């Protein structure tokens, strides 16, 4: 039950960092949604803002770590060109493209995932900034709070698309 | 609304949102542009093992941060219509999503 170095990094990228971001989203969303002065006392708002700063800040950091590890560590292994006569199982992109039944996992799946994933940290940072900058105002300003929630959902959507496609691509052509 | 929360200018929040939209759109433009132009694709090869993806995303991040700095400086202590800023942001992010969607950017691929 051992993992190669490449498998370990793929797991760190997808399951620990990416998966961690996706799991933390529900807590962040609940926190933002219920941040209302009509639902919370002044002490409750203060506590919630403190927690939201940690949560959105850490989520933005984790999102960046996810895309950096993907783009600069795992992706090079995925896209490495196979030498003549090589076992294509060691070269995921070549492996997928060589099989007409699997090629779309690269031409659609990876091509979408590798680009759209980067939207997540950019949007996550915007949300974290709004929380840090406006803090208690979010509890009073429904419009601003809803904007933060929508941006947060978009960050999750981008990460979710990348995560789901990554999971399926790994199943079809794992990095060994 | 408390006096403290009333006094926080909305300009910085607008800058953060719009800059995020500019950054995501830039990634979309680089993605589609690399399909259209072999020269751009080559120029975006900042880190060979990752190929043009390294340049597309690096340019997107740089443009995002620079636009945030610029807009943040311009709107630092100013009021800005947040609804307008949010609409602009959604349009930019939406265009960015479209331009990173393979069936869309493939339309611009060189034969």
Image (cartoon, rainbow, N blue to C red):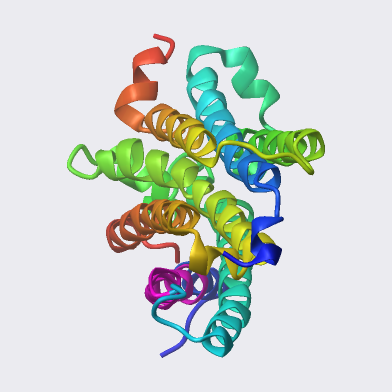
Q: Is residue B81 above or below residue A30?
A: above
Residue at 38% of width from left, 75% of height from top?
Answer: A30
Spot occupied by residue B38 in the image (x, y as percentages of width and height): 57, 14
Work out whether A40 lies above or below A125.
below
Q: Which quarter of the figure has residue A162?
A: bottom left
Point 53% across, 30% down: residue: B25
Q: Residue furthest right?
A: B73
Which quadrant of the structure image shows residue B82? top right
- Up the image or down, B51 lies above or below A91; here it is above
| Quarter where residue A160 is shown | bottom left
For image coordinates 59% across by 42% down, the residue present is: B20
**Residue B67 appears in the picture as rendered:** yes
Main secondary-structure element of the magenta-colored stretch: helix
x, y percentage for residue A135? 62, 68
The single residue placed furthest to the top in the displayed view is B111
Please, is residue A128 above or below residue A104 in the view?
below
Q: How many marks?
A: 0
**Quarter of the image that includes the C terminus of chain B:** top left
**Is residue A23 magenta-colored?**
yes
Residue B12 coordinates in the image, percent (x, y): 70, 46
The quadrant the N terminus of chain B occupies is bottom right
Foreground residue among A127 and B105: A127
Res. B47 visible in picture: no
Give the image location of residue A153, x and y in percent: 39, 57
| Bounds of the magenta segment | A15-34
Foreground pick, A64 / A49: A49
Q: Is residue A54 left or right of residue A112?
A: right
Give yes or no for residue B11 being in the magenta stretch: no
What is the residue that sits farthest to the left in this orientation?
A: A101
Left or right of B103? Residue B20 is right
């Amino acid at each position: 039950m051992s993992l190669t170095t490449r498998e370990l990094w793929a797991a760190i990228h997808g399951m620990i960092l990416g998966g961690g971001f996706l799991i933390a989203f529900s807590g962040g969303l609940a926190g933002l949604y219920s941040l209302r002065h009509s639902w919370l006392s002044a002490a409750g708002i203060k506590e919630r803002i403190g927690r939201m700063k940690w949560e959105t800040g850490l989520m933005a950091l984790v999102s960046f770590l996810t895309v950096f590890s993907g783009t600069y560590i795992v992706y090079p292994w995925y896209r490495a060109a196979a030498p003549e006569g090589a076992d294509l199982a060691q070269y995921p992109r070549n492996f997928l493209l060589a099989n007409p039944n699997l090629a779309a996992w690269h031409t659609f799946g990876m091509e979408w995932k590798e680009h759209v994933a980067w939207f997540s940290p950019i949007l996550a940072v915007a949300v974290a900034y709004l929380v840090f900058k406006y803090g208690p105002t979010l509890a009073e300003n429904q419009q601003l709070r809803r904007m933060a929630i929508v941006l947060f959902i978009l960050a999750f959507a981008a990460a979710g698309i990348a995560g789901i496609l990554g999971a399926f691509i790994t199943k079809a052509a794992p990095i060994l | 609304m408390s006096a403290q929360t009333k006094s926080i200018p909305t300009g910085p929040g607008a800058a953060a949102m719009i800059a995020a939209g500019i950054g995501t759109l830039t990634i979309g433009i680089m993605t589609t542009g690399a399909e259209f132009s072999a020269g751009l694709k080559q120029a975006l090869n900042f880190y060979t093992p990752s190929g043009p993806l390294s340049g597309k995303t690096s340019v997107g991040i740089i443009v995002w941060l620079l636009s945030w700095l610029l807009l943040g400086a311009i709107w630092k202590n100013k009021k800005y219509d947040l609804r307008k800023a949010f609409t602009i942001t959604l349009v930019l992010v939406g265009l960015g999503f479209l331009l990173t969607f393979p069936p869309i950017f493939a339309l611009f691929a060189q034969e």
